[in-house]
């Protein structure tokens, strides 16, 4: 990121509060020096502040299951709050780390919300620049069962707020999205995970202390008390974007005996349901030319939490399901990986020779997903070898 470096740059943080979390940076927004508001108590920059960040359970509309990830909140000090002599107001002076950041945005300025979001992105680009290390000024972790993270004993100032997975390393929670049209810098986002969802967060700027907005505008000329503790209705919103997590499914097939002759093909129908939706439906096959064990992997296509039914729909004329196996198996997808010792997204089948001695002849199995009048189902037909392909 290219920045013109300045030392201890001053700026007047005058902006409009537009119901975006990043617009909480309006806390020390300075109004025109002719402001006449009188607070019950003047600004006290020696007083410590509190910031509560809401992280309530969220659900994707399709599934309806609300979940909450384990998160931590990092605050990076972007600027110090400095009392403006003669007025009940303050200004910001950027720290050396963020000296190139320019957020001189006037209250009511067109596109103020977008500009503040851009400035938060620029601040995040400084924090997470390749090869750089900037330590957060404060960090707090969400307590078990809580719907908020609370940071206390904070110095007044302007902060970059980063919400991330509490148990993740930076390489795992940091997402870099290339900027459009080659602009600088790349977009910075962070992630956290629940059982079924990925929560994606954008960086935000937050100022402490603040005042309540009037007609959508936050300024130190507004009436009322200075707010040093942002809790409850005044708490910051983390506002994540949700997406489904996906996991791998493995189908294991054991053939205990093999009757010499044509290859033995086994076909499985796989259907996954998440909430009220069918989220995956397909067929897979395994072909044996000797006894043994084979596996088929369906990689990262089925959402975590989905209920999956794997049904063996074809095993030929020579083999049958073993007494201790089952032709249909149902499991719930977990977020484990194949490398985990306790990986459980596995449907296992075992077939034995049925003793008929029939070897059969070569066939082609044709599967079609079609509506039978009562819903979509898999239709299976066998095409004997030598039969012309009607699709040719």
Image (spheres, rainbow, N blue to C red):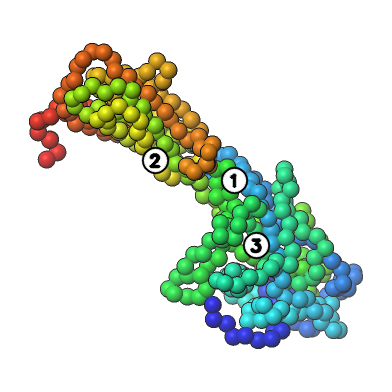
Residue at label 3? Answer: 162
Judge whether 73 appears above or below 286 on screen. Answer: below
Mark toward the start of the polypeptide (1 vs 3): 3
- Distance CA(mark 1)–CA(mark 3): 18 Å
Q: Return the x and y of residue 189 as percentages of the image width and height.
A: 56, 62
Q: Nearer the viewer, residue 324 or 139?
A: 324
Comparing labels 3 and 2, the label whose residue is closer to the camera: 2
Q: Which residue is mark 1?
A: 194
Secondary structure category for the residue under label 3: strand
Q: CA distance from mark 3 to mark 2?
A: 35 Å
| Vertical relation: 370 (above or below) 10 | above
In the picture of the structure, the residue carrying the numbered disc 2 is: 298
Look at the picture and state if 28 lies above or below 265: below
Quarter of the image where one finds residue 272: top left
Instruction: Answer with the quarter of the image where residue 223 lies.
Output: bottom right
Asked whether residue 206 appears in the rendered view, the answer is no
Drawn side of residue 368 relative to residue 322, left or right: left
Q: The N terminus lies in which quarter of the figure?
A: bottom right
Residue at figure coordinates x 80%, y 79% from the top left: 82
């Amino acid at each position: 990121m290219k920045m013109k470096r300045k030392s201890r740059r001053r700026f007047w943080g005058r902006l409009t509060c537009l119901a975006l979390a990043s617009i909480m940076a309006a806390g020390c927004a300075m109004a025109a020096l002719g402001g006449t508001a009188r607070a019950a108590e003047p600004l006290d920059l020696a007083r410590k502040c509190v910031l509560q960040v809401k992280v309530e359970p969220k659900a994707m509309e399709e599934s309806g299951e609300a979940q909450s990830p384990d998160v931590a909140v990092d605050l990076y000090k972007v600027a110090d709050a400095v009392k403006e002599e003669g007025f009940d107001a303050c200004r910001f002076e950027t720290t050396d780390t963020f000296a190139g950041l320019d957020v001189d945005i006037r209250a009511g300025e067109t596109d103020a919300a977008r500009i503040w979001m851009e400035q938060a992105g620029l601040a995040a680009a400084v924090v997470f620049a390749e090869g750089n290390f900037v330590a957060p000024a404060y960090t707090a972790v969400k307590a078990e069962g809580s719907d908020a993270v609370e940071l206390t004993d904070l110095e007044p100032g302007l902060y970059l707020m980063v919400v991330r997975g509490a148990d993740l390393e930076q390489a795992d929670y940091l997402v870099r999205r290339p900027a459009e049209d080659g602009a600088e810098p790349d977009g910075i986002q962070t992630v956290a995970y629940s059982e079924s969802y990925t929560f994606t967060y954008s960086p935000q700027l937050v100022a402490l202390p603040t005042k309540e907005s009037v007609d959508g505008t936050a300024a130190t000329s507004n009436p009322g008390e200075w707010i040093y503790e942002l809790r409850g209705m005044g708490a910051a919103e983390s506002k994540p974007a949700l997406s489904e997590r996906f996991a791998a499914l493995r189908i294991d097939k054991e053939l205990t005996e093999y009757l010499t002759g044509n290859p033995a093909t086994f076909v499985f129908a796989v259907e996954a349901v998440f909430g009220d939706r069918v989220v995956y439906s397909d067929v897979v096959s395994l072909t044996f030319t000797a006894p043994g064990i084979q596996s088929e992997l369906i990689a990262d296509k089925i959402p975590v939490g989905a209920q999956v039914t794997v049904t063996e729909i074809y095993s030929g004329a020579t083999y049958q399901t073993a007494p201790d196996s089952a032709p249909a198996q149902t499991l719930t997808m977990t977020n484990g990986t194949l490398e985990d010792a306790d990986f459980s997204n596995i449907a296992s089948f075992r077939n034995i020779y049925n003793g008929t001695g029939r070897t059969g002849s070569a066939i082609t199995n044709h599967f079609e997903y079609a509506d039978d009048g009562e819903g979509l189902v898999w239709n299976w037909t066998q095409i004997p070898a030598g039969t012309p392909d009607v699709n040719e």
